[in-house]
Image (cartoon, rainbow, N blue to C red):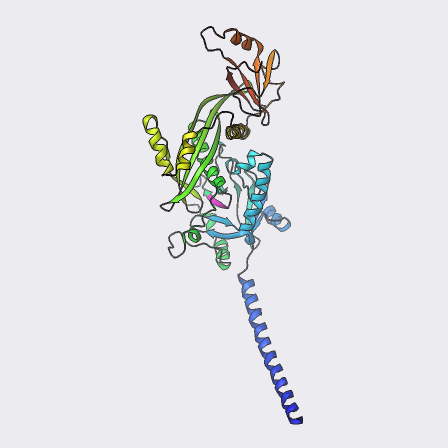
Amino acid sequence: MFKIAICDDELISENKVNILIITFFIIVILVGVLLTSRASKHSIELYTYNGNLSTEEQVEYIKHNTPILTEDDIETYNLKDNKLFFKDELIKEGESRIKNDKKQQNPETAYGFINGGSKTLNVEKNTKFLLAVDKNIIYAGHFADSMVSSSLNQGIVIYEFIDARGLEIKYNKDIYEGDKTPDPRDSKLFINALKDMNLISEKKEDKSESHEEKNHSPRLSKEAIENAVFEIEMRELETKDQEHYHSVVVDCLKYFHEDDEVVAICWVNSESYSFSEGIFESQTGSSMPIEYRFLNENGLSLKTQMLAEDGSYYTKSLKKMARGDKELEDILFSYPPNPNSEKQNEAYDAKMKTLRFYAEIKGLKNFTYSVDEIPGYDKDVFIFENMENQPEGTISIVKKDDFEKAKDSIGKGNWPYYEGVNLHIESGIVTKATFDTFKNE
């Protein structure tokens, strides 16, 4: 028994030595991995600032300020398109803030992409930025201006994706510099840092990965589609007509995949207004179903669009859009909703808020009013709340003389109508209107 005990002690001692040796090798391996990891770890930081900073001041600035974005917020970077994709955590933070702003009915945030800057990063238009790698400034630039601004975005400009899931960094060369100016985005330090941290996404041509992985397609949603269509239609209006003030409301009725493309069937209501003496007056407008086909590569990009045809072809074109979907077909044929329906009231509400936002970013001043201060309608008027056939949330104001003249003409052959204005209470927007009801007297 005694010999056996000694033998056991020897085995135990031998096992301890083996355990120590194995532990030592594990530590060596872990230290090596850690050192390798640290060697490939870089800092990529985006700083924002206002005003002007000299080169020396920029260097000092990044030493003492907090970046708005770091390498930990980057999912991937596409070198071919210079597009940076956010990690889901950052996107969710931005979405949470945007939803909260929408509850507060702030159209500027709801349609942040039209106003430049970045919704996700909470950055305003024209804000200047510095991009630094390992505390070395790579280049400076600014976030995009409003899409309706007449100013030219030059230099390095950051544009946020329509769906707010990433940024595109564009280099708009100064027209006086010529084409020989090096592209600052091709910085070796920046590209090598991305490579070392495995942040570079595969090229589009690489067929080995799935379509979703290869192109980093945005999460499709009704809101993302509506935002994309909103931007398309607003840009088209602004390009054709810079004199008037525009408003666009989009209702995406259905979206689906077809032939590797995203098809969206939307009802689009657009209107252009003149402005005079405090009052907006509709000049042109349309309300129609439109089919959009998008490529879904690095964000939604429009490929084609098809409008419903006129006349005898209208019904046939709606059926073609519906593709045998009876429910969608019924919706298309029932649009637009009744004037006093909840959906129509929501659309009018959105239209007035968008018009106010558009007017603000176009630089219009002092164009919103309360009921007792509307130019030309501040005395000798009738004020009607919830007038028949008018949208909810509006107050109708008419001059007494015009109302009485129209009333006296009832039954005398001519259509009895009178002009006045509608005040959209929440936005303070006043629009010219024509009325033909006397039930609110």
Q: Position of residue 307 (x, y in %)?
A: 37, 32
Figure quadrant of residue 316:
top left
Q: Position of residue 95 (x, y in %)?
A: 56, 44
**Image quarter hosting the N terminus:** bottom right
Residue 51 appears anywhere in the view = no
Q: Residue furthest right?
A: 2
Eyeballing the image, is 428 above or below 52?
A: above
Which one is in front, 165 or 260?
A: 260
Q: Position of residue 94 (x, y in %)?
A: 56, 44
Residue 128 appears anywhere in the view = yes
Q: Residue at x 54, y 18 (%)?
A: 421
Eyeballing the image, is 60 above or below 279?
A: below
Q: Residue at x 49, y 24 (%)?
A: 339
Q: Position of residue 357 (x, y in %)?
A: 54, 30
Query: Main SS type for the magenta part?
Result: strand
Q: Is residue 108 left or right of residue 173?
A: right
Which one is in front, 19 or 290?
A: 290
Figure quadrant of residue 104:
top right
Q: Is residue 166 magenta?
A: yes
**Image quarter hosting the C terminus:** top right
Which segment is the magenta one? 165-170
Q: Residue at x 54, y 40 (%)?
A: 117
Which one is in front, 312 or 216?
A: 312
Eyeballing the image, is 186 above or below 153?
A: below
